[in-house]
Image (spheres, rainbow, N blue to C red):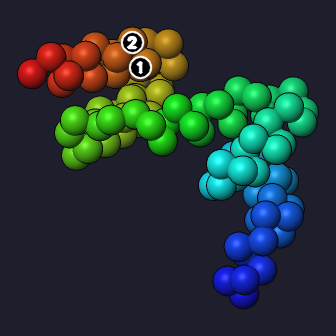
């Protein structure tokens, strides 16, 4: 099973229908320009992997509050992202 998943073609065939970026850089590079959304999704996967998180636990809480505020209807998405941005910038400034 592991050998099958290690094969790039097999991995891509499993991931592609999900809409998520593959977990392998070679698959991201090879398939980046397929479809309308792949360039954005795949580039975001590369950026997110390279982002240094100063305080993982606090960042998780900030992102959790952001999502919960939208899901619960307390905030619209724009307001939730703005609030999270302020909180993360404050966290970085510490």
Q: Tell me residue 6's x, y (percent).
A: 71, 73
Left or right for 72, reference 2:
left
> Could you say which disc has been placed on residue 80 in the image?
1
The structure residue drawn at horizontal position 20% and vertical position 22%, both measured from the top left corner, is: 92
Q: Label 2 near label 1: C-beta < 8 Å?
A: yes
On the image, the x and y values in percent for residue 12 come to 81, 59
Disc 1/disc 2 C-alpha distance (Å): 5 Å
Towards the viewer: 8 or 89:
8
Along the line of sight, the residue nearer the viewer: 8 or 54: 8
SS type, badge 2: helix
Which is nearer the eye, 39 or 7? 7
For residue 62, side relative to residue 13 (left or right)? left
> Residue shown at 87%/27% (left/top)?
36
Which x, y percent locates residue 64? Answer: 36, 39
Q: Answer whether residue 18 is visible to the viewer in this image.
A: no
Q: Residue at x 48, y 42 (%)?
A: 49
Around disc 2, counting alpha carbons within 10 Å, would you say few (fewer than 14), some (14 to 19), or many (20 or more)? few
Residue at the extreme right of the image, as rendered: 35
Q: Which label belongs to residue 65?
A: none
- Quarter containing the N terminus: bottom right
Query: Which quarter of the figure has residue 31?
Result: top right
For residue 57, side relative to residue 47 (left or right): left
Which of the two residues, 17 or 51, is positioned nearer the viewer here? 51
Asked where in the image residue 46 lies, by quadrant, the reply is: top right
- Residue identified by numbered label 2: 82
Image quadrant containing the C terminus: top left
Residue 81: tell me if it is visible. yes
Determine crowd level at label 1: few under 14, some 14-19, many 20+ residues with C-alpha closer than 10 A.
some
């Amino acid at each position: 099973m592991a050998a099958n998943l290690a094969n790039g073609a097999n991995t891509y065939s499993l991931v592609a229908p999900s809409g998520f970026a593959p977990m392998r850089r070679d698959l991201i590079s090879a398939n980046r320009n397929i479809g309308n959304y792949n360039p954005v999704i795949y580039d975001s996967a590369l950026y997110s992997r390279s982002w240094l998180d100063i305080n993982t636990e606090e960042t998780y809480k900030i992102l959790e509050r952001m999502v919960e505020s939208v899901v619960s209807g307390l905030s619209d998405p724009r307001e939730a992202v703005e609030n999270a941005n302020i909180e993360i910038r404050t966290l970085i400034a510490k």
